[in-house]
Structure formats: structure tokens, C-alpha cells
Image: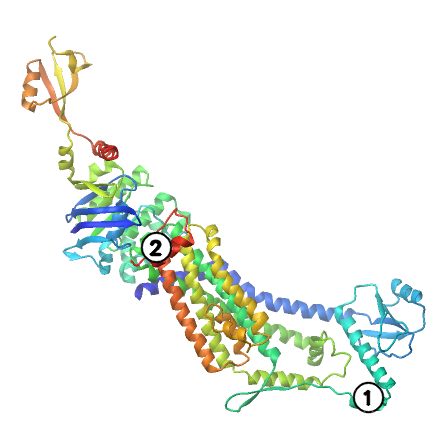
Amino acid sequence: MLEITNLSKAFGDKQALTDIDLIVPEGVIFGLLGPNGAGKTTLIRIINQIIEADRGQIILEGQSISPSDIRKIGYLPEERGLYKKMKVWDQLIYFARLKGLSSQEAKSRIDKWMKKLEIDSWKAKKIEDLSKGMAQKIQFIATVIHEPKLLILDEPFSGFDPVNAEIIKNEIIGLKESGTTVILSTHRMESVELLCDRVAMINQSKKILDGTIREVKNSFKPEIFEVTLVDIPDNLPVEYGATEIAPGEWNFQTSLNGQTPNELLSQFMSYGQVTQFDEVKPTMEEIFIHQVKTAENG
Amino acid sequence: MDKIWLVIKREYLARVKKRSFLLATLLTPLIFPALMGIIVWVALEERDSQALRIIEVVDENKLFFLESSEQYAFSFSDVSPEEGKKLVQEGDRYGFLLIPKIDLADPQGIVYYGEDNPNMNFIMRLENRLKKKIEEQRLVRSGIDPKVISEVRTDVSIRSIRLDDEGTESVSNATVNYAIGFVAGILIYMFIFIYGNQIMQGVIEEKSNRIIEILVSSIKPFQLMMGKIIGVAGVGLTQFLIWVVLIGGLTTLVTGYLGMQLPQEQAMELAVQDMPTEEFTEAVPMDSDVAEILQVINGIDFFTITMSFIFYFLGGYLLYGALFAAIGSAVDAPSEAQQFMFPVTIPLLVAYMGLFVFVLNDPNSTTSFWLSIIPLSSPIGMMGRVSYGVPWYELLLSMGLLVLGFLATTWVAAKIYRIGILMHGTKPSYKLLWKWIKSSE
């Protein structure tokens, strides 16, 4: 769907992106991660052709990206806004028509979306009379109204209460299922784990990580296992620091220490009845923090 | 092109639909006829209610005679100065004019006492009158027959006729030309400022509300900027047209109504009443004056004036509009815009001052020429000249340069705009703007 090769951009003497390579396959939700100032917004702006890259190539659907591709892309910026004094309906029509929809098409689609999100009654309201969450919904409609093949969402859940965030989350999943490719830029790691098929992480202008959630997690697993034993005889070494979580039921974590998981398991089997033997996988949040810290320290 | 049209439509409708636009558009033209009506009405009232003002005159030379008019009567007597002053204090007389024994070669010591501050016109009329009398007396002293003097006295009024290259003659009148240049210049000046500011506010709104990022992901910044400039121009033209129609209609109505209240002749008299010399000298027959003004108006090339007005009106607006858009894009809030307003305000002010100091007084001076040629000042400068008649090649040069100037400012503005609208939190300086202009991307 989207292939980025060797992309670089500098603002004056500040490097915003350094040799970024990314492949976003069709029909996935692609998580773009990274701390503030890492270069995510710059990358998104370049894909949207708001600014130009110094170097590198962007290929959309097999062809070098061009201004006419704007119709294929829907973009929800992190800092978002609407005309405060304009009515909801007029505003949506305006944005839809700027994306190249005919007046007729724009009307019927907006109608459909407003019914879908149950905000039909807001048509004649001005944005300044809506709450922040309400305005966000309007903005979401404005982003998807032209049925883009590539949807770029920058922090789409900020400003939503949990109920509305859930609605938007389901809409994003629905769009993915109907074939839309989504690039999701966010700090919220729980939504990344829940939604994304693939992730890439950018830090200090460079890509430092790339792959499916599973691949990423596997490459960062610290080889720690959580073990629960019952009916322990007295010979369990103290160094495990096991705690009794229920009468006669002991739980602790331990690392492989060069052994294979099977060797470790058979070792515990000799102590007593093993009721749990789990590999502890890092959360995306832990990976994120770990990666950023590593980069900072060296 | 389609997208520019969408932006133009939105910018236009968003402003025209506002209640404040409706109010300003409808109320402003009401103010003019209302003011005119009030002034005429007050003048009429005052005239009706005004008692004849009697002025006591003591002329120790026994030389002067002042004809009474409708408003002022002069009563000559021999009262002492103290008695005269007392008459004024007690309200028996409006004023007291004391002409002591004077040396005709060097008249000194004439005093007027009045309870009110006398109005300047009245004093000027008295001075003119006395001056004339003294001059006559001196002529008599030097042995010229009073009969000859009264025979010699003439009234001169110069008819100025403009001759163009083809030899066509047209009656011109500096006052009418002055008025046209004056009004056109001020209108353009106001239009640029009011609507330039609207462009700037609009750009700042889109930038500070972060609408801009969505917009520029669908439309080129240049298209967006031009759409806004043109849309706002449409608002200005709409407002201007409504004003013309309303002011024209209402003025006709008001003057029509007052005209019925007041015989035409009297209205005319009222209008010229404040001209200092008119009342004392033998009035030039009113008819010929009116006829001349009509002739002058007929002689004016309204087609050229209207066409140039529209051209400079729009040209000046577009030239400055682009700069206003650039300023708006560079700042985060209207309060920050002040520092960049200077280079926009100064040429406009220079043109505006130049209009009064140079162009209207001497439309053909070198300064006037340059003011009407340089694109930054030509919209105002040339409008001051055009009613006096300008050679076609100068007009063409000025218009051509204005188009070039407009293209240049738009080019510069677009460069600043494109980068400025996406910049947040950086405090822009001239140095930074220059960097943006130079950046080639």
C-alpha cells in the first residue's frame, strides 16, 4: 500500500527524519510510535504532501505519490480544529468538497455518517456550541468522508471520553475490515496492542523498531517465567523469593539463566505440582519506555 | 481552480452571513443621510429662530457705511465706548464695533466687542468689508473720482477650460476634481485597511484553531490564500455596492423631502451662506454657478474615472491583501501581528498623506507623479490625479506597475504563508521571514 524508502528531512540544522524506511501493507492498522518530537508529525505531513522531503521516495499503491493522491488519503491531525462560527453541516460539506466530492455525494455521505454516529440533530449547530468530544466526532467524519484508502490518524482518541473513544475505536476497526489501511500515531500503548497489526517506532528522527506486534514483543522478551507451585516440600530454594498466594500455593518469577524452558520446567516439577508456567511478555508500553531510555543513555 | 472557488465561496458566505456584516452594511449608509438631514434641519431651525442681530457701530471717522443683511443689522451712533460695551453686556445689542480715528494708510485699533465668541466668518466679512472701504477712501484721497471707482469695480470669475490633445475643450473646476480625488482616495485607503485586516484575522483564525492542517492536506496553501483574498474582496465589493445604492437612494429621499419643505432658492442660499465673501459682495447670479458646476460635471470623463477607480480599488487591495495574509500566517495571535504591520502601514500612510499634501494640490508635480506610479502608493495617488486628467501612457504605466507589484507581493506573501501557517510557538522575526522567502522548496 505505502512504501517509504530512505526518507530524510531537516529543518535548518535540526534533523527531523533520517533515512526512514517503512512498509505499510494494505488493510492493516499500522501503529506509528515514538516520543514527542521524534519526527512522527513530520513524517505524516510529508505523506500528506503538506511539506516536501529533502530526500527519499514515497510510493502509494505502486506509484510515486502525487498531488492527485490527496483524495486517497484521510488525515486527522493531532492538533485539530474546525471553524467555530460555521454550522456542522456546512462545515462537513466544505471539507468533503475540498477533497473532491460532488455536492450530491457529499450530502448523502454526511447524512449517512451523522446517522451512524447518532449526531443527526447537530446539523444546524455551530461548532462553538458543541463540546470538545462532539467536535471531535465531526472532525472524524470530515476525515473519513471521502472514503480514503489510506487513513492517517494522529492521536485519534485524545479528547474523547471512554464511551466515545470506544465508538471511534469500533469505527476504525470497521474501516479496516472494509479494506482501509490505517496509520495510527499515538502514545497510548494499550490502544496500540488492541488495534495495531504492525508497528514502527521512531526516536530522534530514526526508525528504531519495526514489525508485527508479536515480532516486536518476541524480540524484547526478557526470558522470564512466572511459576506457581502447590504442595511444595521444604526443599524449594529461598532465592526464588516465592510468596504464598493461597494456603499451600506459591508463586514466583524466575529467569532462564541459560537453561531451556523445558530444563527449567523439569527442575520445578521435581519440587512439586506445577500449576502455572508462563513466559512473561513485555507490554508495548514497557518496550516503548525501554527503547526510549536506551536511546537517551547511549 | 475548482477548489479555489470553494474557498472563495466559503470565505464570502461566512462573512456575509454574519449579523455584524448586516448591521454595518445597513447602518453605515443610514448615518450619512441622517447626519445630512440633521445638519440641514438644525440650520433651518436656527435660521427660523434667529432674531436679527443688531450691532452698534461707532465710527469716529464718519467714513464707513455697512449694509445690513438678513442676519446682521448695523446701527450707527455716537455712543461712548463704555456705553457701547454696556449695550452688549445688557443684551440690547449683539455686538459693538468701535472704529477709532484711524490713519487710512495704516488702519489700527478697530475693535469688536461681543458677548459670544464671534464666529470667524463674521469677523472675516467685517474685515473684508472695511478693507474695501478703506481702499476706496484711499483711492478717493489720491484724487480718483468715486464714480470712476464704482465703474471700475469688477467681479471676476475664471472659467477654467481643459484642452486635450485632440483639441476638445471641457470646462473644469478644481473643486469638483478635488472632491472626486479626495473621496476616491479615502475610499481606497479605508477599503484596503478594513478588508486587509479581515484577511489577516481569517488567516490567524485558521492557524490558531488548527484548521489549517486539514485544509492544506486537501488544497495548496497558495490556492487557500488566494481564495481567502478573493473571497474577502467579494465581501468588500458587496458591502460597497449596497452602500452606494443605499446612500444614493436615501440621500435622494432625504433631500427630496427637505427640498419640498424649502424652496430651492432658499436651500441654495443656505448652502452658500457660509462662504465668507458671498454675502457682502454683489452675489454672482446663482443660476450661472449651478450651470457651471453642471457643465463641469458633464465635462468629467466618468468612464475613465469609474474604470480606474475599480482597477485601483481592486489592485491596491490585492497588493496589500497578500501582505496582510502573510502577516497573519507568521503570527499566532492578532496581538503579535502589530510588529509586522509597520511596513504595510507606512506606505499606505505615505500615500494617504501624499494625496492631501501633493496630489490634490498639484496633480502634475514630480512628487505627485511618483506617488501615482509606484505600486505601493499608486492606488491612492493615481485616484487623486485621475479626475484632473492624466495622459494615457502614465495611466497605463501606473496600472502595469500595479499589476507587477501585486504579483510580486503575492509571490513573497505565498512564500511566507506556506511556511508560516504550519509554524506554532516560534516567535517570528524579520530575519526568519526573510529565510522563509529565500527557502526554495
Dot 2 lies on which element?
Answer: helix
User: Which amino acid, mark 2?
Assistant: Ile
| Quadrant of the rendering where the C terminus of chain A is positioned | top left
Q: Residue B358: x and y, percent?
A: 57, 72
Q: Distance between the residues labelled 2 and 1?
A: 80 Å
Q: Which chain carries label 1?
A: B
Q: Which chain carries label 2?
A: B
Q: Note whether residue B440 is visible.
A: yes
Instruction: Give the answer, above or below, for where A274 lies relative to A98.
Output: above
Q: Residue B419 carries which label?
A: 2
Horizontal side, residue B339 vs residue A274: left or right:
right
The residue that appears at 52% across and 87% down in the rendered structure is: B164
Q: In which quarter of the image is residue B140?
A: bottom right
In this figure, which residue is indicated by the disc labeled 1? Answer: B149
Instruction: Give the answer, above or below, for where B276 lies relative to A67.
Output: below
Q: Residue B134: x and y, percent?
A: 83, 79
Dot 1 alpha-carbon crowd within 10 angstroms: few under 14, some 14 to 19, many 20 or more: some
Horizontal side, residue A66 vs residue B403: left or right:
left
Instruction: Give the answer, above or below, for where A225 lies relative to B24.
Output: above
Front residue of this view, candidates A283 and B373: B373
User: Which amino acid, mark 1?
Assistant: Ile
Q: Give the number of marks.
A: 2
| Extreme residue in the top direction | A234
